[in-house]
Amino acid sequence: MSKQEARLLLLFAGFMMDSVLSYFLPFSYTKNNLMCVPCIGMMFFIFLNHYMNRQDRIVYSIGVGLYFAIIYAHSLLIYVIIYGVIGFAGAKYERLSSFSFTETLLFILAMFIGKEIVIFMMMKITGITFLSLATYLTCRLVPSIALNIGLFIPAYYGFKKYQEIAVEKGYIC
């Protein structure tokens, strides 16, 4: 298996885990109840982003953004831009980071919160949602943050195990 195939497989697995978890997590059709949004695919993208060169980072950012937009969100441009920003921020973060547990958790939370705020603003501007910011924070953002902090722990250590296997097989991340 090549390095590119291993990356794509890991990203696909992350997004599939998101899909499975979304099926079992609370979803509010009226948007007034609790709603949790898992982001394991985004976590794996950020983990992999740390080990990519500039060209791969751009291609993967656009590819992952398009995949997420077409398959999950049914909107085209916003997720390409969001994942592009995550890729760019990841490049800046890479220079300053040791990729420790705490640093990575804080970076992922910052990217998740930024993504959710951009999505909320786009929904507000286009008139898709009529929720107040307070309702959005309490019913979607805070429960999603709590969920993703819990999901981060196995994702982080699972990625560390993936790294060990990748080094052992010779296709270093």
Image: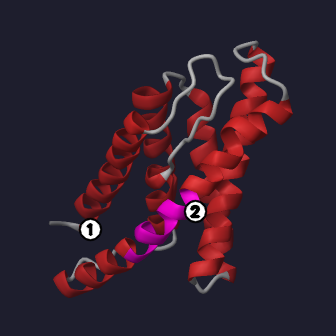
Task: Locate the C terminus and report the quarter of the image it occupies.
Answer: bottom left
Horizontal side of residue 29 vs 159, given as left or right: right
Above or below residue 56? Residue 24 is above
* Residue that carries the numbered disc 1 in the rendered image: 3
Badge 2 or badge 1: first in the primary sequence: 1
The amino acid marked with disc number 2 is Ile
Distance from disc 2 to disc 1, alpha carbons, whole Å, reads 28 Å
Return the mark for residue 128.
none
Looking at the rendered image, the disc whose residue lies closer to the viewer, 2 or 1, is: 2
* Residue that carries the numbered disc 2 in the rendered image: 149
**Residue 103 quadrant:** bottom right
Horizontal side of residue 103 vs 36, given as left or right: right
Q: Does the image show residue 52?
A: no
The image shows residue 101 at horizontal and vertical percentages of: 56, 80
Give the SS element for disc 1: helix
How many numbered marks, from 0 up? 2
Residue appearing at x 41%, y 69% in the figure: 154
The image shows residue 63 at horizontal and vertical percentages of: 43, 43
The image shows residue 8 at horizontal and vertical percentages of: 30, 54
The reply to whether the magenta stretch includes residue 36 is no
The amino acid marked with disc number 1 is Lys
Depth order, front residue of 25/61: 25
Task: Locate the N terminus and report the quarter of the image it occupies.
Answer: bottom left
**Residue 80 quadrant:** top right
CA neighbours of label 1 inside 10 A, class few (<14), some (14 to 19), many (20+): some
Horizontal side of residue 142 vs 79, given as left or right: right
Q: Give the residues in magenta.
A: 148-157
The reply to whether the magenta stretch includes residue 152 is yes
The image shows residue 124 at horizontal and vertical percentages of: 79, 21
Above or below residue 18? Residue 160 is below
Give the SS element for disc 2: helix
